[in-house]
Image (tube, helix red, strand yellow):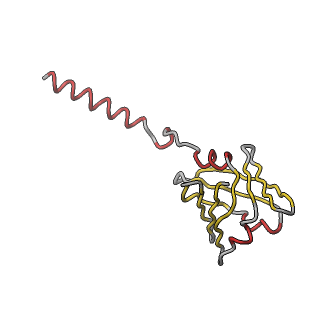
Amino acid sequence: MKNLTVFSCFIILTISLLASCTRESISYGDTTREAITKSQWSIDYYFTGQDRTTEFSIYKFSFTGSGIVKAEDRSGSFTGNWNMVKDVMRNDILSINISEAHLQSLNDKWTVSLIQDGSITMKGATSEVRLKRL
């Protein structure tokens, strides 16, 4: 009888803990945001209809915590804005907006698909980009 009471208490406690653990109450780390703001990046792969990596590999990108993105090459630097949100599936979405004409093809909502070994791979509606940590 004592075992049955202990077991019943255990079941009630487990059910109440599981009921309070909703998807919204689980803490998800901001690992993409942390990674992207801690380093400078280059593009080591960019495909949008064709491989355009060489057009963009000359730039160094910096993302600040205040939402500013800076792209630098030998001719100068260009700034824009960036933002990170999570979609309904809890994927990180990186939005970039740079007004420089040559860099505007990077303006997209990029779904982060992989973070590993100093690189971040992201997919847009019809393109893919991989950033490499410098």
The answer to which image quadrant residue 8 occupies is: top left
Q: Nearer the viewer, residue 15 or 133?
A: 133
Q: Nearer the viewer, residue 26 or 75?
A: 75
The residue lying furthest to the left in this view is: 1
Estimate the x, y position of residue 126 in percent, counting from the top left.
62, 71
| Residue located 60% across and 64% down the image | 123
| Residue located 36% across and 32% down the image | 16
* Quadrant into which the N terminus falls: top left
Describe residue 3's horizontal placement relative to residue 47 as left or right: left
Image height of 24 relative to 119, above or below:
above
* Quadrant into which the C terminus falls: bottom right
| Residue located 63% across and 47% down the image | 33
The residue lying furthest to the top in this view is: 2
Image height of 56 relative to 6, above or below:
below
Estimate the x, y position of residue 80 in percent, counting from the top left.
79, 55
Q: How many marks?
A: 0
Estimate the x, y position of residue 118 in percent, counting from the top left.
59, 54
Describe residue 22's horizontal placement relative to residue 15 as left or right: right
Image height of 76 relative to 36, above or below:
below
| Residue located 64% across and 72% down the image | 47
Estimate the x, y position of residue 108 in percent, counting from the top left.
69, 63
The residue lying furthest to the bottom in this view is: 50
